[in-house]
């Protein structure tokens, strides 16, 4: 968190855009390190998520939310000092197009902060998270929701290096306070969550495939426990 704080300190009274904000998880990280913002705008295509985000940030007068699509940002050139995209890269069909949009609405001396969980370098417990997440993504894709598997760190770098005029300035692993190992109750909740994720597969012709995959993941989690996959921050600037 110290590194995020240092990055934000360079932009007093910043105008911030958080793309694919969901319920505002990344905004929570931003406001946990400073409150020196002119405004934070969280956008998402899901009204439902934004309603929850609105409730979460009701006490923050400088935070507001709008329904908007990352493919067509409804803002003028050079509007924001800081633009964030957290755990959403693998939800996007055309990453390069969206990076170009981010570059367009970024101030000339501003920064883009990409935060993304990775699928490489994981221990066995973290692999549980990845398997569960990739399973949910596979079911989403069957229902025509854009949701790819997460990327390796190198794949993310390759995506982020794909836009002329933008360059990665620094990157690091986002560290969270050490969390306790999951209890038997936590593991049971996860198993229940897998059943919930699988609910729509009841209507699929190949529901047996999903049932077996779900059972395999449950067995893996019971054997190897569960931990969150690491997340990496990449800071980009105009080059
Ligand atoms: C996994 S959530 C990430 C939420 C949050 N940023 C975080 O770090 O926890 C991905 C979010 O991206 C949103 N999303 C997907 N495609 C989008 C698009 N084209 N434009 C804006 N938001 C999008 C989804 O609705 C979802 O809320």
Image (cartoon, rainbow, N blue to C red):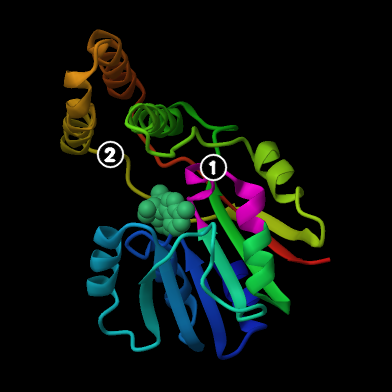
| In the displayed structure image, the side of residue 191 where residue 125 appears, left or right | right
Q: Secondary structure at mark 2?
A: loop
Residue 97 vertical position relative to residue 202 in the rendered view, above or below: below
> In front here: 155 or 217?
155
The crowding category of the residue bearing disc 2, from other C-alpha atoms within 10 Å (few below 14, some 14 to 19, many at least 20), is few
Q: Secondary structure at mark 1?
A: loop
Answer whether labels 1 and 2 touch (C-beta < 8 Å). Answer: no
Q: Earlier in the sequence, mark 1 or mark 2?
A: 1
Residue 178, visible in the rendered structure: no
- Residue at mark 2: 182
Q: Indicate the position of residue 18 as horizontal and vertical percent values.
A: 48, 68
Residue 60, visible in the rendered structure: yes
Residue 108 vertical position relative to residue 23 in the rendered view, above or below: below
Specify the quarter for ligand 1.
Answer: bottom left
Q: Indicate the position of residue 107 as horizontal and vertical percent values.
A: 69, 79
Residue at position x 69%, y 76% in the image: 110
> In front here: 35 or 227?
35
In magenta segment, residue 91: yes
The residue mark sitting in front, 1 or 2, is 1
Residue at position x 47%, y 44% in the image: 91
Q: State the image quarter where residue 187 is shown.
A: top left
Q: Indicate the position of residue 43 as horizontal and vertical percent values.
A: 42, 67
Q: Is mark 1 within 8 Å of ligand 1?
A: yes
* Magenta-colored span: 86-99
């Amino acid at each position: 968190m110290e590194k995020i704080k240092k990055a934000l300190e360079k932009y007093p009274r910043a105008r911030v855009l958080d793309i694919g904000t969901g319920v505002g998880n990344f905004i929570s990280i931003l406001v946990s390190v400073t409150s020196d913002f002119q405004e934070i705008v969280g956008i998402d295509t899901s009204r439902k998520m934004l309603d929850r985000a609105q409730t979460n940030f009701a006490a923050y007068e400088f935070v507001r939310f709008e329904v908007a699509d990352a493919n067509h940002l409804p803002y003028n050139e050079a509007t924001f000092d800081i633009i964030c995209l957290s755990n959403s890269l693998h939800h996007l069909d055309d990453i390069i197009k969206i990076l170009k949009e981010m570059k367009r609405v970024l101030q000339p001396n501003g920064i883009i902060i990409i935060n993304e969980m990775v699928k490489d370098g994981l221990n066995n417990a973290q692999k549980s998270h990845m398997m569960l997440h990739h399973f949910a993504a596979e079911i989403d894709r069957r229902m025509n929701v854009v949701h790819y598997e997460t990327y390796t760190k190198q794949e993310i770098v390759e995506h982020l290096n794909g836009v002329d005029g933008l360059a990665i300035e620094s990157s690091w692993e986002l560290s969270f306070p050490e969390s306790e190992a999951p209890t038997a109750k936590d593991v049971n909740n996860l198993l229940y969550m897998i059943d919930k994720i699988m609910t729509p597969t009841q209507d699929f012709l190949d529901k047996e495939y999903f049932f077996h995959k779900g059972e395999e993941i449950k067995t893996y989690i019971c054997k190897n426990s569960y931990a969150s996959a690491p997340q990496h921050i990449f800071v980009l600037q105009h080059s």
